[in-house]
Amino acid sequence: MHAPLLATADPALLDDLRRLAAAAGVDAESAPDAVAALRRWTGPPLVLVGADLAGELAHLGPARRAGVHVVTWGTPGEPDYRAAVGVGAESVLGLPQAEHRVTEVLSDVGEAGPAPGVVLGLLGGSGGAGATTFACALGQVAARTGRALVVDADPLGPGVDRVLGLDGCEGFRWDALCRTTGRLGGRALREALPRRGGLGVLGWYAGASEPLQPGAVREVLSAARRGHDAVVVDLPRSVDGPPGSATDEVLARCDQVVVVVRPTVAGVSSAARLCARLPDRDRVRLVVRGRGVPPAEVAGVCGVPVVATVADQRGLHESIDLGLGPVRSPRCHLGRAAETVLARIAVLGVAA
């Protein structure tokens, strides 16, 4: 990926743009005149053209391309917009008012990658099904080969940071993120959260139980997808909130939703009612945890395919109490089931 190009002969404007690029975490190249900008016009993923050069550059007839913005001081005027049309710019940004927008487009360049991460939602088909435990297992296994994040969207749950042994680590929780405004960068979010190696968590401060705001959920999941290869969201069991609720926001952004089912008569009955309430059931899969009703019958009752089964695991509570998380060994039951789900869900997510 080439660096973004800053095309301006105004030293003050160039300094300001370099400052914003540094804040976005990207290196930028500069062109001091229109001819130099034209020579490098098609290579960079982003070109910020100073208003001082925009008119001259328009006369040179640059090729039309995406990712061009004209930057000026103060409120843009009619000459700025005419020049922007001449260079094929997407917008005209006036500093300092538009600093946030300039930082946004620069951040997008810094976060560009081969593909956004996959977002998986986890739901318990019944009380005690173990959805939080399996969400944490998925995060641990996904972190072996990439950057993974487990998001706790249930303020009344056990806490994914505690299950993973990351509750003592420094970093932002939902409470802090819900007070922020503006766009979150994927890398900035990743670096702000508690983590161990490739695994990060977004949980709650002790005792916090404030409901999530849909806008905060939307922004966090967008940044999480840009900054991680796999994002696993532990959802509350209730999906009957009002339209536009935080749970609706998560479900709308999940590539796949995994419902963890206990194969008892009561557990399967509860899971079937839950699955019937979920939108777009083509994106829903089941994980059967434990012994009892055969998986084929569970799938038939729920009307949703089973993607994996997992036996009850010895020493699970001890492993969690020791701060090791549910996947203590690569070959444990939860670890193998998580590998199966990630392998199959990745294909399903791409196909969707």
Image (cartoon, rainbow, N blue to C red):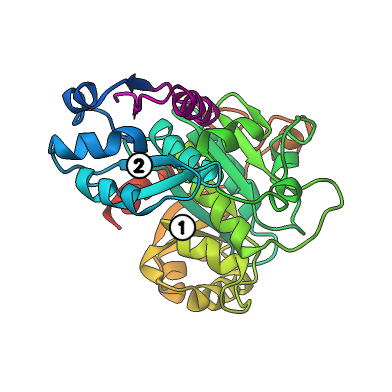
Q: Which of the 4 quarters of the picture holds residue 205?
A: top right
Query: At 57% from the left edge and 34% from the top edge, which residue is drawn?
Result: 188
Per the image, label 1 sits on a secondary structure element best described as: loop
Q: Amino acid at mark 2?
A: Val
SS for tag 2?
Answer: strand
Q: Which residue is mark 2?
A: 70
Q: Position of residue 294 (x, y in %)?
A: 47, 63
Quadrant of the rendered structure where residue 162 is?
top right
Tell me if residue 162 is in the magenta stretch. Answer: no
State left or right for residue 227 relative to residue 175.
Answer: left
Quarter of the image for the C terminus: give it: bottom left
Residue named by callout 1: 254
| Viewer-side residue, 218 vs 63 | 63
- The residue lying at 60 percent from left, 61 percent from top is 215
Residue kind at label 1, given as amino acid type? Cys
Q: Position of residue 187 (x, y in %)?
A: 53, 33
Q: Nearer the viewer, mark 2 or mark 1?
A: 2
